[in-house]
Image (cartoon, rainbow, N blue to C red):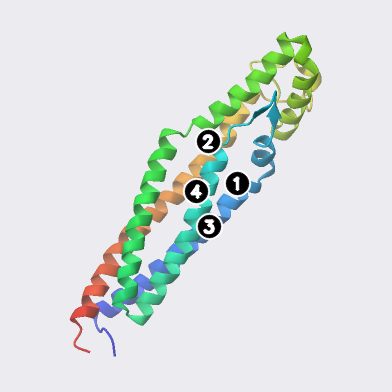
């Protein structure tokens, strides 16, 4: 017969939260894949200049998110199945996985907060190196010009404080300086990830409470 009364209600609550958790994992996985294949970010970070590759911090973060999203979907399915089957073994395994995943999400959140401006700063410095080469080194002007044209077209920006030195390389007559655009581009995506991570951690706390409570209720059930 299984658990009855309040534990039975807890069982369905756990199933509901796990379903939301599974969906959240799918959302994070989808957002990570979107970030990885988004035209602006993917083209931007595949650029090379003077044998130097664009900063890879962004891609490292995205691959971590892909792994976390996939793991969340797996753990969410495990929790749903364990709750419905009222299996102490599955619920115990689910709880252990959830604790590990919770620690990883918190650690990743702290790392992301500390390094929230790193990606835009690295990319801005990368752009500035090409800009300075174009304006001050005639020998490197042609190579730098090709890089700047691609950068400007991809991000729809031009120049630093102004664009009079690179006016011929601008994608259009009305453009914003590249420092502002790059900072806004990545800060928007970071906040989106941060909000998703906060919602997920709150769900995980409830799931850990419900899974342990249900596991104890199943152990003490006379049926």
Task: Report how far apart the C-alphas of labels 4 and 3 lie in the structure.
Answer: 14 Å
Q: Residue at x 29, y 90 (%)?
A: 1
Nearer the observer: mark 4 or 1; the answer is: 4
Quick check: 151 above or below 12? above
Q: Residue at x 54, y 56 (%)?
A: 29
**Crowding at label 3, few (<14), some or many (≥20) Cα neighbours within 10 Å?**
some
Residue 192 seen anywhere in this rendered image of the structure = yes
Q: Do tag 1 and tag 2 residues touch (Cβ < 8 Å)?
A: no
Nearer the observer: mark 2 or 4; the answer is: 4
Q: Do tag 4 and tag 3 residues touch (Cβ < 8 Å)?
A: no
Q: Between disc 3 and disc 2, whose residue precedes?
A: 3
Q: Between disc 3 and disc 1, whose residue precedes?
A: 3
Q: Is residue 195 left or right of residue 158?
A: left
**Label 1 sits on residue:** 35
Q: Secondary structure at mark 3?
A: helix
Q: Total label count?
A: 4
Q: Nearer the viewer, residue 92 or 200?
A: 92
In the rendering, at what x and y percent does residue 110 appear?
38, 40
Q: Between disc 4 and disc 1, whose residue precedes?
A: 1
**Label 4 sits on residue:** 64
Q: Is residue 144 left or right of residue 4?
A: right
């Amino acid at each position: 017969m299984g658990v009855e009364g309040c534990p039975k209600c807890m069982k369905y609550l756990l199933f509901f939260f796990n379903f939301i958790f599974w969906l959240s994992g799918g959302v994070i996985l989808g957002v990570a894949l979107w970030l990885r294949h988004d035209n602006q970010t993917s083209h931007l970070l595949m650029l090379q200049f003077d044998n130097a590759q664009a900063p890879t911090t962004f891609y490292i973060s995205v691959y971590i998110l892909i792994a976390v999203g996939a793991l969340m979907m797996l753990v969410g399915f495990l929790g749903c199945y364990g709750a419905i089957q009222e299996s102490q073994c599955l619920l115990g395994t689910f709880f252990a996985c959830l604790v590990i995943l919770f620690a990883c999400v918190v650690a990743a959140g702290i790392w992301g907060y500390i390094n929230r401006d790193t990606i835009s700063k690295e990319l801005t410095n990368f752009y500035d190196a090409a800009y300075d080469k174009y304006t001050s080194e005639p020998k490197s002007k042609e190579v730098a010009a090709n890089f700047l044209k691609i950068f400007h077209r991809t991000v729809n920006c031009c120049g630093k404080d102004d664009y009079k030195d690179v006016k011929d390389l601008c994608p259009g007559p009305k453009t914003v300086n590249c420092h502002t655009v790059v900072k806004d581009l990545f800060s928007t995506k970071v906040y989106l990830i941060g909000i998703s991570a906060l919602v997920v951690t709150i769900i995980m706390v409830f799931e850990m409470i419900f899974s342990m409570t249900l596991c104890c209720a199943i152990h003490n059930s006379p049926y």
